[in-house]
Every structure is written in C-alpha cells, then in structure tokens.
Amino acid sequence: MGYHEHKRLENKNIGCAVIVTSDSRTEETDESGKLIKQRLLDNGHKVAYYTILKNDALTLKNKIIELTKQDEVQVIITSGGTGLSHKDITVDTVQSMLEKKLDGFGELFRSLTYQELGTASIMSRATAGVINGKVIICFPGSLGAATLAMDKIILSEIGHLVREATR
C-alpha cells in the first residue's frame, strides 16, 4: 500500500492530550497551548485533555502513564521542557518511557527550525515516539515552535502516525 492509500485510510478525528511544562505559565498566559488546541480543533481533532505541569519528572511521567491508559487519547503533545537548562526535564522523562522512537520528527523539526533561526536549532531536543500504542510528540514551548510543529509536521501526519502506532 502506497503513501496516498495510507493517508486515505487514516483517522481524521484524533483524540489528543496537550501537556505544557512550565514553572511560570498559566492558562491565561499559555499562548502555545492555546495555539496547539485551536489548530487541533480547527482540523477536526479532539482535545481530550489539557494541563500545565511544573517541570517535575515524576509528575510528568505519572501524567503520561495515566493518559496512555485512556481510550479517548491517541496522541499526547507536550510543549516545553526540551531545552538545555537543568529545569528542562520533558525530553529526558519521555525518552526513558519510549517503546519506539520517531527520530525523523526531531530531525525534521530541527531542519525547519534551522531555516528560520539558523544554527540555534541545534539546541532543540524535540522528539517523538510511541508509548503503549500512543503517539507522543515533544517540542519547545515557544509560540514559534508550536506553530512550526503543528503547521509544518503534526497536522499533516497525525492520522497516519496514529494508524501506524495502533496496527
């Protein structure tokens, strides 16, 4: 089966969880989370869960475990905690849980970021993979990163990712 046949068969109504990791954002100030949720809804997907979590590895890990057990969640999107600071625990936490890594997401994200920001793109540790049959995608917390990830990668492949992860 070719790529276009796969795209035709993919689920168009994906249940998503959005986790923003930040020690300072609130629902009112979380522009990235708002953008992610709106892009999902605008494209016919569901936001089954949304939260802002502090940069705490155990809290994040427990929330991801909880979400992977929920039937209505097929994709978990995290925004924030992907940098080099000692507070940035999202990538390390998620990578320790991955059953399968999707290296191409981080590679493509960094390539697209390079086109916009130049060599600073090397500091992004954006990553993706599969945990318990659920797709998890992690990218930086800036509004620019959220826009790039959603508009240039995630929205065009989300259904295909879910289809493949659940086969």
Image (tube, rainbow, N blue to C red):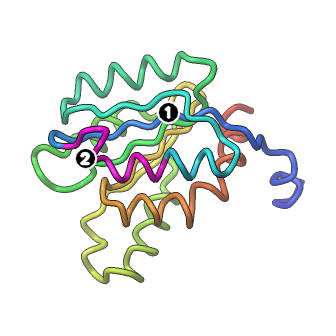
Going 36% across and 36% down the picture, which residue do you hit?
Answer: 94
Q: Tell me the SS state at disc 2.
A: loop
Q: Is 4 rendered above or below residue 161?
A: below
Question: What amino acid is at disc 1?
Answer: Ala
The Cα–Cα distance between marks 2 and 1, rounded to whole angstroms, is 16 Å
According to the image, label 2 marks what residue? 81
Which percent across, then down, holds residue 159?
71, 46
Q: Residue furthest front?
A: 28
Going 81% across and 54% down the picture, which residue do you hit?
Answer: 7
In this view of the protein, which residue sits in the foreground, 110 or 32? 32
Question: What amino acid is at disc 2?
Answer: Gly
Work out whether mark 2 precedes mark 1 in sequence or the reverse, and give the earlier one.
Answer: 1
Number of numbered discs visible in the structure rendering? 2
Which quadrant of the structure image shows residue 155?
A: bottom right
Tell me if 48 is positioned left or right of 111 in this view: right
Tell me if 120 is positioned left or right of 135 in this view: left
Query: Which mark is nearer the camera, 2 or 1?
Result: 1
Tell me if 88 is positioned left or right of 165 in this view: left
Going 72% across and 38% down the picture, which residue do you hit?
Answer: 13
Q: Tell me the number on the disc at residue 121.
A: none
**Range covered by the magenta-colored residues:** 25-36
Which percent across, then down, holds residue 149?
48, 60
Which percent across, then down, holds residue 141?
31, 53
Q: Is 11 rendered above or below residue 147?
A: above
Q: Tell me the SS state at disc 1.
A: strand
Is residue 86 one of those drawn in magenta? no
Q: Is 124 rendered above or below residue 138?
A: below
Q: Tell me the number on the disc at residue 17.
A: 1
In this view of the protein, which residue sits in the foreground, 112 or 29? 29
